[in-house]
Amino acid sequence: MDARPLLSDAITPLGLDSSCEAECESHATHEHWRLPVPRYLREVYTWAYVGRHVRRVFDHQWVVALILWFQDLPLMRSVLNEIKSGDRVYMPASVYGHFCIDLAKKAAPGPVTISDISNIQLFGVRKKRQQHKLSNLIVRRANAADPIPGPYDVSISFLLLHEVPEDYKTAIVSRLLDTVDAGGKAVFIDYHKMVWWQPLWPIMAFVAWSLEPFTFTLWKNEIESYATPDRRAKFTWTKTTSFGGLYQKIVAVRKPE
């Protein structure tokens, strides 16, 4: 898949209250809001993240629950358990449902920075921030492969890696590790190769083949392998799987300097 960038259709952010407000968001420059949308995202995931009406369809917790075979809450809780009050938290892609809200509430008063490359997704996060009065929630526009610089106490990749090509996986894992402060952690939640008896094998294989073609490499590659050797050595890695191996959780804790 060609991962070269393709400019978004609109110059001004879709659905934002005003270009001035978007420009002022966390001191983001006007040019930041003109970052190109990657070609792979437009070619493969317009139906989920870029189309004008995707939020109306997908941004409901019950929809997230159906997509994740009702494992949404256990997966989200497993991430929230890694966060304590006052932590500086970063997530380089927004998530449908109430997960962004939960992150901000769990880390408060610590700042929670959520970035995305899709203006529509950013509008959704900003709307939730306003509705729930989450003053510690910071919204930025950025490519996941070029995250907002830290340091952070907890950096999170939540079901992101299976949606990006291999070069993006390498960049996201390596650079997300770079954002973690000493003693902090990077948490990766994503799909995993299922055990042989998992009855969802044929369904998930069809979904990956038809809608999410970048998933297959996560069935054979360890997430840790996408980090460069020097970066891997700076962290202590733990891995757990759940739901018959369908999901994995990786926690990489940065060793003291």
Image: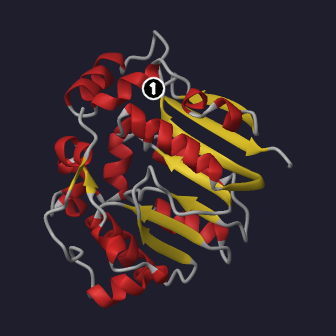
Q: Residues within 10 Å of mark 1 (few under 14, many from 20)?
A: some
The total number of labels drawn is: 1
> Is 13 in front, or is 195?
13
Query: Residue 121 falls in which quadrant of the image?
Result: bottom left
Q: Position of residue 185 (x, y in %)?
A: 70, 49
Q: Residue at x 34, y 53 (%)?
A: 62
Q: Residue at x 19, y 50 (%)?
A: 46
Q: Position of residue 153 (x, y in %)?
A: 71, 59
Give left or right: position of 194 versus 16: right
Q: Residue at x 52, y 58 (%)?
A: 91
> Is 185 in front, or is 134?
185
The residue lying furthest to the right in this view is 256
Q: Position of residue 242 (x, y in %)?
A: 56, 29
Question: Please, what is the three-letter code of the amino acid marked with disc 1?
Answer: Leu
Position above or below: 176 against 111: above
The N terminus - image quarter: top left
Give left or right: position of 203 versus 89: left
Query: Residue 109 falls in which quadrant of the image?
Result: bottom right
Q: Position of residue 231 (x, y in %)?
A: 68, 38
